[in-house]
Amino acid sequence: MKIQNTIKASLLATVFMSLNVMAEKKLELLEEVKPPPKNFESDIVDEPQITITKKGTDTVEEYRINGELYMMKVTPPAGGPSYYLLKEDQDGSWAKFDGPSQPLSVPKWVIFRF
C-alpha cells in the first residue's frame, strides 16, 4: 500500500512539473491597456426619454430607453389617481399597477435578438 501511494505521489509530481514547464513556455507579455479617451461617448442612454401626450381625456407619459417603450403613466382628468403600465416581456404584454412602487418583476432577459 505504501509503495502504491509513493508511486501515485511521484507520478502526480511529475505531471504537475511538466505542466508547469509547458505553461512557462507559453507565457507572453501583454501590452499595457490604454485608458479610454476622456471624450468617450456611448450610444447607451442611462436616463429615460419621457414623452407626454394626450389620449382622449387622459394624459399619458411614455418612458423609453434607447428608443424602446418600457413603461407608461396614465393620469385621468380632474386629478384622478394615476396608474402605471409596465412592459412585462418582449411579446408586448403589459402589467397594470398603482402607485410609484413597482410590483415584483420576474427577470426575463433577452439573450439574442435577430
Image (cartoon, rainbow, N blue to C red):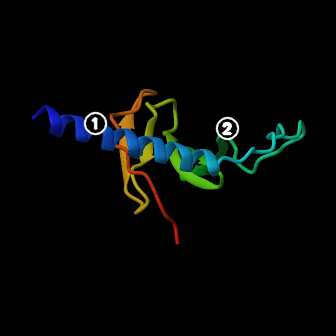
- Location of residue 101 in the rendering, given as x and y in whole percent from the top left corner: 42, 27
Between 14 and 106, the one nearer to me in the picture: 14
Disc 1 residue type (three-letter)? Ala
Please state, as top left, top right, bottom left or bottom right, where the N terminus lies in the image: top left
Q: Residue at x 24, y 41 (%)?
A: 8
Residue located farthest toward the front when viewing the structure as drawn: 3
| Marked residue nearer the N-terminal end (2 or 1) | 1
- What is the C-alpha distance between the residues marked 2 and 1? 60 Å
Q: Is residue 35 left or right of residue 22?
A: right
Q: Residue at x 40, y 32 (%)?
A: 102
Which residue is label 2 attached to?
Answer: 47
Q: Is residue 30 left or right of residue 39?
A: left
Whether residue 77 is visible, yes or no, is: yes
Whether residue 62 is visible, yes or no, is: no
Q: Residue at x 43, y 30 (%)?
A: 81
Q: Give the crowd class for mark 1: few <14, some 14-19, many >=20 residues within 10 Å.
A: few
Disc 2 residue type (three-letter)? Glu
Between 104 and 84, the one nearer to me in the picture: 104
Between 69 and 110, the one nearer to me in the picture: 110
Between 20 and 89, the one nearer to me in the picture: 20
- Location of residue 49 in the rendering, given as x and y in whole percent from the top left corner: 68, 44
Q: Is residue 69 above or below residue 16?
A: below
Q: Which residue is drawn at 46% across and 41% down?
A: 17
Q: Is residue 11 left or right of residue 63?
A: left
- Location of residue 11 in the rendering, given as x and y in whole percent from the top left corner: 31, 44
Which residue is label 1 attached to?
Answer: 9
